[in-house]
Amino acid sequence: MRDLRGHRALVTGASSGIGRELARQLAAMGADLVIAARRRDRLDELRGELEAAHGVTVTCVDVDLARDGATEKLWQAASAAGPIDICVNNAGFGIFQLFSDVPLQRNQEMVRLNVLAVTELSHRFVTAALDRDRRAYLLNVASTASFQPVPYFANYAATKHYVLAFSEALAHELARTQVSVTCLCPGGTWTEFFDTSQQTLGRMARASMLPADKVAAIGLKAMLRGRRSVVTGGMNKLAAWLTRLAPRRMNGAVAARLAGRPSRTLPGRGTGPDRLR
């Protein structure tokens, strides 16, 4: 296991799912943490667990990154006690529904969180890291949905395509610097995401599901090795590769078939988990 004692890591969407497991594994490596999410009670619970188990310092910041000014608030709180060496942009959400049935405000919130918050935090982190003579790591969490258009996940898949393309381009720009950029593209993961998105998984999709701790381990291993992107799971890697060969219209049709059809009910903004994969 990599020794990260003396490093400070910021993890968004840390109250559950992949984000929580990323925080746990970074703490196990000795990194001090700043964990951010909307639900303060879950953050406090995780802080107690990690400080007791690993003797690290954990700072909690309850923040809704879909709100204006939220990334500035988070970055100021995160960097107040010292520089950030590892930035993990994990927070995100999706809604499995007809685009026209999702209120415009919810679609706007999805773009603000999945795209703008990632962009703003990445910029703040990279510009600060380039001023330091020390290895730094940026890990952005996308999805296998980023490789093709996904009907009923139209906005979500588009935002995750942005995260993947943005991360890979940024990795190229920073290749000769001390800042490494990695994009983690999980397939289906056993988290609360499906409670929020309201997607019912078919047999094939369920067969490729991975536990959140394994997905987190794959992402951190790729990050520390300086890989530009990584897809979790053999079936997901094959599916992502096949999208390069098929016409885009076919990719969308296959994705729609695998995803199934949505219900006509929408979760309220205050229900479900924090922003998750």
Image: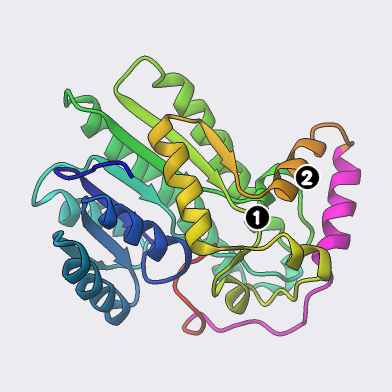
User: Which range of residues does the magenta coloring cover?
Assistant: 248-269
Residue at (15, 59) in percent of width and height = 56
Q: Please state which of residues 84 and 163 is positioned toward the viewer in this rendering.
A: 84
**Label 1 SS:** loop
Side of 151 relative to 55 (left or right): right
Picture quadrant where residue 170 is located: top left
Residue at (42, 47) in percent of width and height = 118
Q: Amino acid at mark 2?
A: Ala
- Is 225 located above or below residue 68 in the figure? above
Q: Which mark is residue 239?
A: 2
**Do callouts 1 and 2 mark residues in contact (Cβ within 8 Å)?**
yes
Question: Residue 76: x percent and y percent?
Answer: 17, 52
The quarter in which the N terminus is drawn is: top left
The quarter in which the C terminus is drawn is: bottom right
Mark 2 neighbour density, 10 Å: few (under 14) some (14–19) many (20 or more): some
Side of 115 relative to 232 (left or right): left
- Is 149 located above or below residue 47 in the figure? above
Q: Amino acid at mark 1?
A: Gly
Residue at (14, 62) in percent of width and height = 55
Mark 1 and mark 2: Cα distance apart in space: 10 Å
Is residue 244 something that shows in the picture?
yes
Side of 82 relative to 43 (left or right): left
Question: Residue 230: x percent and y percent?
Answer: 57, 39
Side of 171 relative to 256 (left or right): left
Question: Residue 152: x percent and y percent?
Answer: 76, 64
Reply yes or no: does residue 255 show up in magenta: yes
Earlier residue among tags 1 and 2: 1
Q: Which residue is mark 1?
A: 187
Is residue 66 something that shows in the picture?
no
Colour scheme employed for the rendering of this structure: rainbow
